[in-house]
Image (spheres, grey):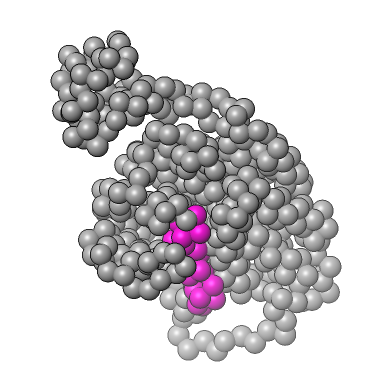
Amino acid sequence: MNQQKQNGNLIAIITMFFLFAMISFVTNLAAPFGTIWKNQYAGANTLGMMGNMMNFLAYLFMGIPAGNMLVKIGYKKTALIAMAVGFLGLFTQYLSSLIGADTDVFSMGAYAIKMNFIIYLLGAFICGFCVCMLNTVVNPMLNLLGGGGNKGNQLIQAGGALNSLSGTLTPLFVGVLIGTVTPETAMSDVTPLLFIAMGVFVLSFIAISFVAIPEPHLHKGNVKEEKFSHSPWSFRHTVLGVFGIFVYVGIEIGIPGTLNFYLADSSAKGAGILFNGAAIGGAIAAIYWLLMLVGRLTSTVISGKVSTRTQLITVSSVAILFILCAIFLPKNVGINVPKVVYDPIAKTSEILTEAGISETEITAIIADPSDANLQKHEASLTAAGLKVADIEGSLETPKVPMSALFLVLCGLCTSIMWGGIFNLAVEGLGKYTAQASGIFMMMVVGGGIFPLLQQVISDSVGYMASYWLIIAMLAYLLFYGLVGCKNVNKDIPVD
C-alpha cells in the first residue's frame, strides 16, 4: 500500500513539474513578443511591455477564484481548464497576425493604437488566466507532496528548475524567428512558435486527463464551508510575504525584460547592436533563465542543509551588488558576443543567400568584403532592401555591454526567491494555507506592474537608470529575509 502511494506521489510530482514548465513557456512569450510591438510603435518601451502587463494583470482577477476552484473541482480539473484557456489565449494572439493591422481604434499620445494590438493584448490577458490557474495548482501541491518545510521548498525549487529551462528556450526561439527587429517585423514572423505552443497545450490536456492527481482540498458532496476565526491576513509574516511575492515577480520579469529591450535597441539609447539585436537579446536573456535553472538545481541540493531564510538573505544581497555593478559600468566596456550566439560568417551567408547571391559569389565576398567587391552586387542587395554597409556590419562580431553580464548573473539569485518567500510566508499557517495560496496568486500581478513602471522610467531616464527600481525592491526582500519572515502570531490556532 505504501509503495502504491509512493508511486502515485511520484506521478503527481512529475505532472506538477511539467505544469511548472508550461507556466514559464506561456509567461516568457510576452517580453520577446513585446520587442515586435515596441518597434511597430516607434520604439515605445511602455507599449512593448503592455503584453506582459496584461498577462500578469489577469492574476489580480483570477487569484482568489483559482484558489476556490481547487476546493470545488480539484487540482486536476483546474489544470485541464487552464490548458483549454491557454490554447484560447494563444489562438487569440495568433489572430492578431491576421486582422486589424490597418484599423485604428484610438490615439494614445503620438501613437495610433491598431486593432491587431488590442487583439494581441486580449490574448495575453487570456493566457494570464491560464498561468494563474496553473500556478495555483503547482505551488501548494508540491509543498504538500514534500511535507512542507525545507522538503516542500526542495520540491518547489526542483519544479522551478524545469520552469527555468522552459524560460531559457522560449526567448531563444522567439529571437531566432525574429532576427533583427524592424518596424516591418510582425506577429506573423512568430506564428510557427504559436502553433507549436497550441499543439503542446493540446497534448498536455490529453496527457493530464489520464494522470491521477491527489485532491487534498476537494470538497465532495454537500460539505458546509468551514468558518475560520482568523485568516492569512492575521499573520504578520504572511502579509509581508504576500507583498514580497508582489515585489519578487516584478524583479524576476523586469530584469531580463528590460535587458532584452536594451540589447534589441540599436539606437544610442540602447546597447547599439546594429545587426541581429533581437536574436542576440533573446539569447542573452535565455542565459538569465538558464542561470535560474542552475540556481534552482543548486537550491534543490542544499535546501536540506541550508535554511530557506539564509538562502533568501544571501541571494537578495548578492543581487543588489550585481545590479549596482551593471548600473555603474560604462556601456563601452563590453565583450564580444560568443560565436554560438552570433556567427558573423554564417549570418552574412544567410543574408546574402536570401538576397539571391550564388554560393560561389558569397564565398568570394566573405574572403574579400571590400567596398569594391560588394559594389558589384549592389543591385541584388538593393532589391533585397539591403545596403553595402549592412553586409559589412553583419561580418563584424558585435559587442555586448559588460553590464548585461551582471544582469544575467542575477538569474542565479532570483531563481530561489519565489520558493523561498512562499515557503517562509506559509510556514505555520496550517488550515489557512489554501486561502493564502489564492492571495499569493493575486500578488503575481506585480510581474506586470513593476516591469511596466520600469519601462516608463527607462523611456524617461534610460535603461540602466531604471534598474534603481529593482534595487529598491531587492532591498525589501532582504528586509523580509532578515526580519519580516518571523512568525510573531504563533498564538493563533491553525489546526
Residue 57 position in % (x across, y down) = 51, 69
Q: Visible in this render: residue 463?
A: yes
Return the residue nearer the eye: 193 or 273: 273
The answer to which image quadrant residue 315 occupies is: top right
Number of numbered labels in the structure image: 0
Return the residue nearer the eye: 253 or 293: 253
Q: Is residue 82 magenta?
A: no
Return the residue nearer the eye: 401 or 59: 401
Q: Quadrant of the C terminus?
A: bottom right
- Magenta stretch secondary structure, dominant: helix
Query: Relative to 272, is 11 above or below?
Result: below
Q: Residue at x 68, y 84 (%)?
A: 228
Q: Residue at x 35, y 38 (%)?
A: 179
Return the residue nearer the eye: 389 or 431: 389
Residue 416 position in % (x across, y down) = 63, 47
In the rendered view, does 193 fall on the left or right side of 327?
A: left
Q: Is residue 61 magenta?
A: yes
Residue 281 position in % (x across, y down) = 46, 39
Residue 83 position in % (x across, y down) = 36, 63
Q: Residue at x 26, y 58 (%)?
A: 97
Q: Visible in this render: residue 416?
A: no
Q: Residue at x 30, y 52 (%)?
A: 186
Magenta residues, as a range? 45-68
The answer to which image quadrant residue 456 occupies is: bottom right
